[in-house]
Amino acid sequence: MENKFLPISMDDMRERGWEEVDFAIVTGDAYVDHHSFGTAIISRVLENAGYKIGIIAQPDWKSDKDFMKFGRPRLGFLVNSGNMDSMVNHYSVSKRRRDHDLYSPGGKMGKRPDRAVIVYCNKIREIYGDIPVVIGGIEASLRRFSHYDYWNDRVRNSILVDSGADMLIYGMSEKQIVEVADAINDGFNPKYIRHVNGTCYIADALDEIYDDYILLPSHEEVASDKRKYAEAFKIQYEEQDPIRGKVLVQKHGDKYLVQNVPERPLTREELDAVYDLPYQKAYHPIYEKDGGIPAINEVKFSIVSNRGCFGSCSFCAITFHQGRIIQSRSKESIVREATEMTKMKDFKGYIHDVGGPTADFRQPACKKQLTHGACKNRQCLYPSPCRNLNADHSDYIDLLRAVRNINGVKKVFVRSGIRYDFVMAEKNDRFIKELIKHHVSGQLKVAPEHISERVLDYMQKPAGKTYDKFRKKFFEINEKMGLKQYLIPYLMSSHPGCELDDAVELAEFLRDTHYQPEQVQDFYPTPGTLSTAMFYTGLNPLDMKPVYIPKDRHEKAMQRALLQFSNPKNYDLVHEALERTNREDLIGYGPKCLIKPRKGDWSYDESRDRRNSASSSKKKSSGKRNNKSSDNKKKDNRKTGSKDNRNRGRNNTESKRNSKNGNSRKSGKRTKR
């Protein structure tokens, strides 16, 4: 029995000899019994704890039928939206409805509702009344406080309030879910299970909260005052630590949302136990007729090595969900999984990845994190690696060697991404040489995201010069080894703080490094991130200083086009961007130019191109302006984030653009495009 999929119907339940299930898990994803799917992990953990679990995957929320397939569960319902927030799953950054859902049969859209957790909970309440309902997963975890919702363009309540659930479990949840299940099994109403770390509940009054707590600005305050929103977010951001964090309380109407401190990370032995459970490593056979579940293709021959991330990029929610303290599996556990993988009938000898949120993080950033928690006001890698950072890849090297030496394994790739600044922080080149020689599939993906120092400051990413050093080292080592492999950098446009001239700077870097990305990602304001708080408030919550936010669609299109300046479809947008930023020196035929002039362009100065060509060998490869002292002065002004300076710059540019040629119709065409 233990090697079968868990029940998805009454017939499956009866085949096991059960009269009822203890918990029914309702999920927005199709049922895939693989440990890369949250539903699979939670269901197997509960099964291992002795509970009878049924899976209700992608129920028809317009009908009662699917929610009643097991009858009334003995203990209650557990609800999640799937591996992604349902709104991110459904909509692109331009709010266009996506065409495919990789977590649904055959990739078909429409199998889950928008705001799935809320919809599912409302339906359960409609059918079963006061039955215990517990929510979790990524959608619940990142929306646990009052939060800015990009799709509504407003601040929404905590999802615990809007869903009407009894309690919320945030984070990865293996410890909490068993403790909560045991309490419900012992007869406790989940509304009054208030002692479990990593959970949220609703209190009627402050005197019901026995722990020391921090009172956040209320929902009503953060929904009406952006500065209050930023203040509340800063506290949430700083207190998400299982060791030094405090209980957080936020008033919603006449009730109080209470977040207990995060659950402590799993030990290596506990994490091994979770991944050693009897997953089928496949989607349920019921989906075969529909073409299967596409999401399994990315993870079927990949191995999860670790959790958590101390990189703390502003735009990423991993630290808010998984925490900054790294948890990793043992070499023995991973070797067991890889050995089992070689016995799968469709295994071709290639393990696609051994990694996690950041592949080369295998231990906490420093020993202090395990006893005192992650630093409240200091990042591990930003703006430069902390002096206490344990930049050592020995354990990861040993792990990769063990996996690639398993009989039947031809090659082991690292595809989930590495932190190149962490690699560069190591005192030797052992890891990067090992990586290049054995674990790159012709292309190595890294995420510099940008090159502008100003933008990288807002992203909490390393300076662009760090990426350039890594890039040069990567190609030097490849050349010495006689290999021809490539770097694929992920790049982002329109991040908070990114102005048009920053996008031009990045375009110049791409020109000088002879790389044109096939895809560029616009910044996507998803719940739970520092960057989203900046996007909504126009403030950096960490210092409360104003941040320029590129929200205008046309400007965003120009920023994106600059990163693909050689694409003929982007010519007009690139041309306009260079005019707006007074960078007509990049329009021409010289080696430093991004685009050629339009035919008959009276403003094109051919002699300038000849001068540029003659002096190009003396210019820095970064393509920045020649006057170094002027550059430094400008950089200092830009880093102050002065709103007045930015407004003057935009007004001057606007004035020039509107007056040029006196052609208002031309300006109107640009706006229309």
Image: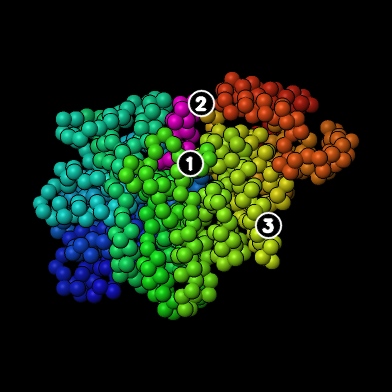
Residue range in magenta is 526-546
Label 3 environment density (alpha carbons within 10 Å; few <14, some 14–19, many ≥20): few
Type of amino acid at the residue the image marks with label 1: Cys
Label 1 environment density (alpha carbons within 10 Å; few <14, some 14–19, many ≥20): some
Residue pictured at 16% horizontal, 30% vertical = 207
Which numbered disc, 2 or 1, marks the residue that appears first in the sequence?
A: 1
Q: Is residue 403 above or below residue 560?
A: below
Q: Is residue 257 left or right of residue 516?
A: left
Secondary structure category for the residue under label 2:
strand
- Mark 2 vs mark 1, foreground winner is 1
Type of amino acid at the residue the image marks with label 3: Glu
Residue in front for this viewpoint, 262 or 53: 262
Residue pictured at 57% horizontal, 23% vertical = 642
Residue pictured at 56% horizontal, 39% vertical = 456
Q: Which residue is mark 2?
A: 546
Residue 600 can be seen, yes or no: no
Secondary structure category for the residue under label 3:
helix
Q: Is residue 62 left or right of residue 442?
A: left
Give the percent coordinates (x, y) of residue 59. Answer: 31, 58
Q: Is residue 164 left or right of residue 536?
A: left
Give the percent coordinates (x, y) of residue 184. Answer: 15, 52
Type of amino acid at the residue the image marks with label 2: Pro
Quadrant in the rendering for residue 509? top right
Quadrant the C terminus occupies: top right
Separation of disc 3 and disc 1 at Cα? 27 Å
Give the percent coordinates (x, y) of residue 15. Answer: 20, 75
Q: Which residue is mark 3?
A: 476
Q: Which residue is mark 1?
A: 386
